[in-house]
Image (spheres, grey):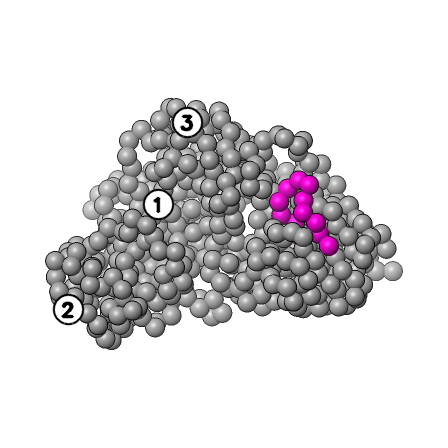
Amino acid sequence: MIEVLTTGLPNTVQDLGRPGRLELGISHGGAMDKTALAVANLMLGNEATAAGIEVALYPFRLRAHVDTAVAVTGADCRVTVADRRYPPWWAMPIRAGETLVVEAPRAGARSYVALAGGIDVPLVAGARATDVKGGFGGLEGRGLSRGDRLRLNPAQPLLPAGGIGAAVEERRPAPGDATELRVLPAAEFDVFTPQAQAAFTGTEWLVTNDANRMGYRLAGETLSLASPLELLSHGIVPGTVQVPPAGQPIIQLAEANTCGGYPKIATVIEADLWRLAQAPVGTRLRFSFVSSQEATEALGARCRWLDSFAATLKPMRQPG
Amino acid sequence: MAVAAPRISLAGSGALLLDAAQGAFSDAVQHRVWAVANAALGLEAVREAVPGMNNLLVLFDPLAATAADIGARLGSLWAKADAAEVAGRRHTIPVAYGGADGEDLAAWAAHCGMTAEEAVRRHTDATYTVAAVGAMPGFPYLSGLDPRLAWARRGTPRFKVAEGAVIIGGAQAGIMPITAPSGWHIIGHTDVKLFDPGSETPVLLRPGDTIRFDIASLQA
């Protein structure tokens, strides 16, 4: 069991979400940065479907009530266990009575705290992820509060005393740089004015403070349609960039409504969704179009990287 | 009947949107959307088929098939789809019209130029079809609203509309499955549960189901 000591409601239990239920109106949901959660689980020898904690509000502190192991990935944060300091993207032992502290990030926005065995909350609609909008999954369908106690599934962590880490070079953007997002054109791209099409990729977009697990509202030039358009409601995927009549885009994310009606100018490729998860309020974004093939290659490269990382961990999992 | 070829566009690297809308919503087109959705789930690499209003979003594994390949297959499924009737279930939804849980009833009736009793009678006279489910868990997009009962959505959505609210938005009728923001008008309330996340079948209403509303009570 672990006990949450310091948190905010944006911090939730998450796993890889509920794909396959969009036709029921149930969002994919799950970790906003799925690769980061996957790496945390891999380092602990957890199932890929194990649930951890997505931290979006800092500092986050928890106390272990058993001897176990914890991994923290995602944003670049100062992480300590009982005042022992660890690098980001690290898995390490934590003993009963010890406290984990994750401080506000120097870069990035969301951290993933995984524990050996994974958090033991019920499977609801096929996953343990908290669906904040629907109020189900996770811990009673809500964000974490001080004093919450979370059970862990049984596990035998096999970690060296100093722990282990993952090297993720692409995760370190130079400070001050805009976040680059690769996009594919969406259904209504051609209906926007040439000026709007040019401004979409030619100018920067600011992540406003209206940014959460459902989506991010952006601020920048006004994107106008060449002619008015009435669309019937249609299914949308995380990464969809909608443009409501006011002309300021919204990027739909993990917990977006499964159907929408606004014109869509583009879709952020799946391989880049983690960059949005790690883009705090005030981040400048820049879009660039790629081909379907490039988008697929980027996704394939990430899958291969995860597979090879899992393979390097395998020798550690042999007991004795 | 002749159905025009749909427009097929990318929705990211692993999804295609097939849009068959030709202006106003069409029941005939929707039957074909359901048929193609079912058939698409049989295609290799296809993960999800999500009917919208006269359109269909199909998610696939881009590492197992290209968008061009899936698009071509969807196009041919559409061309030869047998838009047979979907064997939907019938539901009766008892509604407490008006009162505190149906606060827009009087204004809605006034907008329609009728008494509250008349508007409610017309609302219960129609048979509605669940065209699609989406936006929020278990939310039914209902077709079949008497055009005289239509009322454009509110200028400003309410921050919270309660689970069970029976609502009108433009030419569509709906029921809130969860408490959420909505710009639709609230004419009543039902205790029928549309979404139960803990259940084996968490969502009550499916595309092709039909609904009739029944007057449980009326407070004009």
Establish if B57 lies above or below A287.
below
Left or right: where does residue B94 sit relative to residue A124?
Answer: left
Which residue: 73% across, 54% down? A101
The answer to whether residue A207 shows anywhere in this view is: yes
Q: Which residue is mark 1?
A: A261
The question of residue A109 being in magenta is answered with: yes
Q: Quadrant of residue A153?
A: bottom right
> In this picture, which residue range is highlighted in magenta?
A101-112
- The chain letter for the residue carrying disc 2 is B
Q: Tag 2: residue type? A: Glu
User: Helix or strand or loop: what does disc 3 sit on?
Assistant: helix
Residue A74 position within the rendered picture, expressed as x and y whole percent measured from the top left: 66, 46
**Mark 3 burial class by Cα count in 10 Å: few <14, some 14-19, many 20+:** some
User: Helix or strand or loop: what does disc 2 sit on?
Assistant: helix
The question of residue B6 being in magenta is answered with: no
How many marks the image carries: the answer is: 3
- Quadrant containing the C terminus of chain B is bottom left
Which residue: 27% across, 51% down? B153
Q: Nearer the viewer, mark 2 or mark 1?
A: 2
> As rendered, which of A233 and B216 lies closer to the eye?
B216
- Numbered label attached to residue B117: 2
> As rendered, which of A37 and A142 lies closer to the eye?
A142
Q: Nearer the viewer, mark 3 or mark 2?
A: 2
Q: Which residue is mark 3?
A: A197
